[in-house]
Image (tube, grey):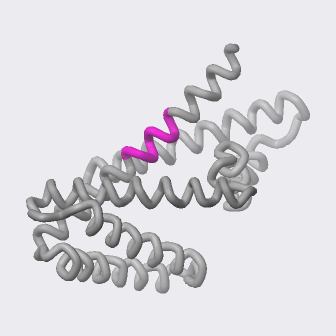
Amino acid sequence: MRWILNLLAITMLVVAVRAQDRASESSDRGGADVSAAVVDAATPDAQIGRFVDRYLWVVPESAGHKASLGIGVFVALAFIIMFSARLANLDGVTFGRGSFCSACVLVVSSLEVAFVPGSAPIVAAVCVLNLAAWFGLVRGALGGDFYNGSVMLVSTLFAVMLSLLGVQLAGTLLQRSALLG
């Protein structure tokens, strides 16, 4: 648990340093106030805009790209869940059961993104309901208990974080190679 908090702290520090670098660059160019640029760079709309500008594939425009991204996320999550179940020592977990669990997780997640407002008590309640749904899914679809569900939850979250880190690393390498080449 401590490594997750350390990772979050390092991420927030990197974001703050990047915002200050951008602010100092903009003040060198136009003489704008550095603190105003840092505050402006920290707004959620600015962060979402920078994220979408950096990762254009997250918001695909054509139907083919949307289908490709959806199928890729579905299959990757199915494999992650299947291997997490193997780590949790659940026998008989096949790709079919992993894909069923993947479909359930993706449907619940997309419904939450679409319908849940961003207030803190509602988000906390949704997190508790997600945990209940996760352990219910592990018990019902995979035949596991609380221990198996806990091991699967931790290993699935670790694999998803590792995948996102790989995407970040690949994006950074591509950006640097484009600048060099």
Give percent across and percent down for residue 53. 72, 46
| Rendering quarter of residue 96 | bottom left
Q: Is residue 1 left or right of residue 100?
A: left
- Seen in the picture, residue 121 relative to 104 is either above or below; the reply is below
Give percent across and percent down for residue 126. 42, 82
Q: Residue sitting at 63 percent across and 53 percent down?
A: 58
Task: Give the position of the N terminus as an image quadrant.
Answer: bottom left
| Rendering quarter of residue 106 | bottom left
What segment is highlighted magenta in the picture? Answer: 162-169
**Residue extending farthest top:** 181
Q: Is residue 150 left or right of residue 132?
A: left
Task: Give the position of the C terminus as an image quadrant.
Answer: top right
Give percent across and percent down for residue 130. 36, 78
- Residue 171 within the magenta-colored segment of the rendering: no
Give percent across and percent down for residue 119. 56, 81
Q: Nearer the viewer, residue 116 or 10?
A: 116
- Seen in the picture, residue 69 relative to 90 is either above or below; the reply is above
Q: Residue sitting at 22 percent across and 77 percent down?
A: 141
Q: Nearer the viewer, residue 1 or 59?
A: 59
Number of marks in the rendered image: 0
- Residue 163 within the magenta-colored segment of the rendering: yes
- Seen in the picture, residue 29 relative to 102 is either above or below; the reply is above
**Residue extending farthest right:** 30
- Main SS of the magenta part reads helix
Q: Nearer the viewer, residue 110 or 126?
A: 110
Q: Residue sitting at 23 percent across and 54 percent down?
A: 83
